[in-house]
Amino acid sequence: MARRKLIAGNWKMNGSLAALAELDTIATAAAAAPNVDVAIAVPATLIAPAHARVPSLAIGAEDVHEADSGAHTGCVSASMVREAGAAFTIVGHSERRGDQHETSHDAYMKSAAAHRQGLTVILCVGETQAERDAGRAERVVQAQIEKSLPDDAHADWLTLAYEPRWAIGTGWTPSMEDIAAMHAIARAKLRQMIGDTALDMRILYGGSLTGANAAEILALENVDGALVGGASLTADKFVPIIEAAKAQST
Ligand code: PEP
């Protein structure tokens, strides 16, 4: 079946109220690409002003806590970001797995919490350079999916993102063959876990995707869109990616 492409930005710990002006042009490009879904995850402090500024654009969080509320100083819950205007959240991003030592079980719990509160989820998996060099990339990604995918995961509310950690923010990307191979492995793993509904689930590629390589990567089988870090910060870099997805969608 045809899966709509999703182009999702991730501002990480970047941006400001002034930077939200970029969203005006991004929202215009998104409106001109009705066959593509466009979304932007922003720092928690920017969710409400971003949503107020461009209500037509899906604004999301970059992380949520696994609990709905409680004594967790400095954290934000899914219900809080939802109230602020978030439609989705990223979960299990490699920078959280690395910097905050989050595990696949944490990603599982957070995905479930987000779903409980009505958010859709972009669940990230991906191997390190050392794991790839050791020939373990495939097994690592399969294990991450196995441990982080909620039991009731469904394409209606969950999107997987394959993001090789060594490709994030580095300017390096895997070969087209390697991207296609890992997406096929991820699709097979999803199918083993949730059956044929896995055929409806989107699998995004993330890692140094730009306007220059978007068309080639987005054309690969089982690549249903992109999670974009650096190139999502400004409209001049992000809009060409939306347009590349638009050109490939019917
Ligand atoms: C990301 O942070 O998810 C990402 C893919 O970053 P970049 O596009 O900068 O590599």
Image (cartoon, rainbow, N blue to C red):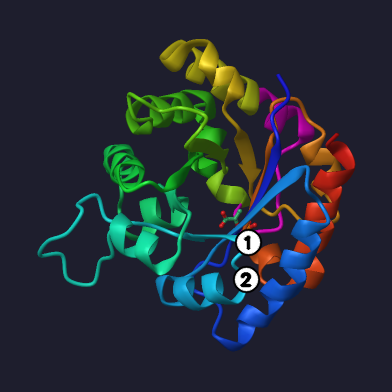
**Amino acid bearing label 1:** Leu
Instruction: Report the disc number at residue 57.
Output: 1
Give the side of residue 141 with respect to residue 56, left or right: left
- Residue 113 painted magenta: no
- Percent across and percent down for residue 77 are 27, 59
Can residue 57 be seen from the camera position used here?
yes
**What range is drawn magenta here?**
168-181
- Percent across and percent down for residue 243 are 85, 53
Whether residues under marks 1 and 2 lie with C-beta atoms below 8 angstroms apart, the answer is yes
Check the image and report above or below for 89 versus 157.
below
> Considering the image in quadrants, where does the N terminus appear?
top right
Neighbour class for label 1 at 10 Å: few (<14), some, many (≥20)?
many
Instruction: Report the disc number at residue 54.
Output: 2
**Amino acid bearing label 2:** Val
Relative depth, front residue between 194 and 166: 194
Give the side of residue 4 with respect to residue 69, left or right: right
Q: Secondary structure at mark 2?
A: loop
